[in-house]
Image (tube, grey):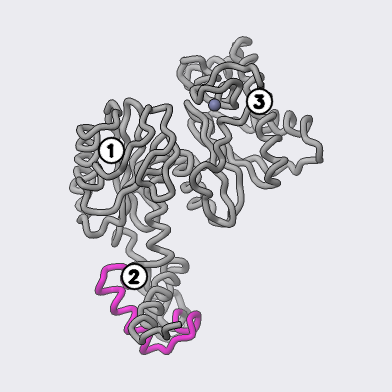
Amino acid sequence: MEPFSLKEIRQQNLRRVYRLICGSHPISRSRIAAALGMSLPTVTQHLETLMESGLIRQDGFMASSIGRRAAAYVPCPSARAAVGAEILPHQLTIAAAGLDGEILGSVSCPLDFHPGDSYFESLAQAILGLLSRLSVPAEHVLGAGIGLQGLVSPDGQEVIYGRISNCTGMKADPLQKRLPFPCRFRHDAECAAALELWERPACTDAIYLSLSMHLGGAILLNGSIQEGRWGVFEHMTLEEDGPLCYCGKRGCLECYCSAEALTGGESLEGFFGALRGGDPDHAARWDRYLRRLAQAVNNLRMVMDTLVILGGHIAPYLLPEDLDRLFTLIQQRSAFPEPDNFLLTGVQKPCAIALGAAIPYLREFLAQPDL
Ligand SMILES: [Zn+2]
């Protein structure tokens, strides 16, 4: 094996200092030296390099009751940004986020999707327009993640299953040609799960169910999302001769637990308004929905004894009593006594899919900063 050159060792140590400041700030020079086993002059050099590149800054002084107070260092979240988009059949949402995962700005507009050049032109213009409005230079952008309703190839350059939007085989190349930074497609359910993982760093394993107009799912294992054809829970068969699913088969979970199946075309706001107002028809539909969801969650729990996170567009409408009812229904089905704390509702954030499409770029940079 080739020995590391002095330059490589220096770069590695620089990244270690940067990661430490990102993970634990404000922090002083001596704390960095102690935590990383470096000499004070070495830390000083690294701090100067990081400040010159705009990745960190000095922000006042550490609190101390004795002696001279030490300078405090913090990361600059806006030193880099990532962009994410959510493509829906008639709507486009774009968000840009800094290194802390907070949204710097977003835009949402009606736009009819079709897998063609003119769509990619509009998408690229919308992304570049947002970055220009936010004064984020292209060289600071780590990449653009494009979240869509479909499964994508491991490199994110092709949609390998896009039946909902009729875009199987769509390539990222026409968009890449129009953007001066990397871009890739991402499955929208994986985007939602990426946001969960970002917001719940302590959660390393979970089953994520996105209860939206169409269902989606993802599996979180050892702190990372299993990409590709994992967690496609929507096409689990619940009934051999059930209703026809868009996948061409019958009785998939999608036919019972998508928001579309629940509301039958009514808005979610309208549905839950009527339900909470005591309408018996809506109450019966909701009960059928929860029974099917319990059936699915119980099956999933037999595969993975782990947390189950319920996200997607239905999640904001879930009340504690709904989770209690769901838990009771699951417990009635389960072969084993269930702990009462495995069901969680997903993180509620604006532009969640777009933000989740951007987050893997932030994670990659923070894990291995390109300094
Ligand atoms: Zn199906």
Rendered location of residue 224, percent (x, y): 53, 54
Q: Is residue 329 above or below residue 22?
A: above
Q: In this view, does 113 lie above or below 121?
A: above
Give the foreground label among 3 and 2: 3
In the depicted view, which residue is nearer to us: 11 or 79? 11
Residue 155 belongs to the span the image colors magenta: no
Label 1 secondary element: strand
Label 2 secondary element: strand
Query: Label 3 neighbourhood size at 10 Å, few (<14), some (14-19), many (20+)?
Result: some
Q: Name the residue under label 2.
A: 59
Q: Quadrant of ligand 1?
A: top right
Task: Identify the mark nearer the N-term, 2 or 1.
Answer: 2
Residue 35 belongs to the span the image colors magenta: yes
Q: Measuring 20% from the left and 37% from the top, which residue is drawn there?
A: 121
Asked if residue 232 shows in the view, the reply is yes
Q: Mark 3 points at which residue?
A: 238
Main SS, magenta residues? helix
Rendered location of residue 34, percent (x, y): 49, 83
Asked if residue 272 shows in the view, the reply is no
Q: Which amino acid does label 1 sit on?
A: Val
Which span of residues is magenta-colored?
A: 32-58
Task: Identify the mark nearer the N-term, 3 or 2.
Answer: 2
Rendered location of residue 347, percent (x, y): 51, 42
Give the foreground label among 2 and 1: 1
Q: Residue 275 carries which label?
A: none
Q: Which amino acid does label 3 sit on?
A: Leu
Q: How far apart are marks 2 and 1 (CA)?
A: 31 Å
Q: Mark 1 points at which residue?
A: 107
Give the foreground label among 3 and 1: 3
Rendered location of residue 238, percent (x, y): 65, 25
Q: Measuring 65% from the left and 14% from the top, which residue is drawn there?
A: 284
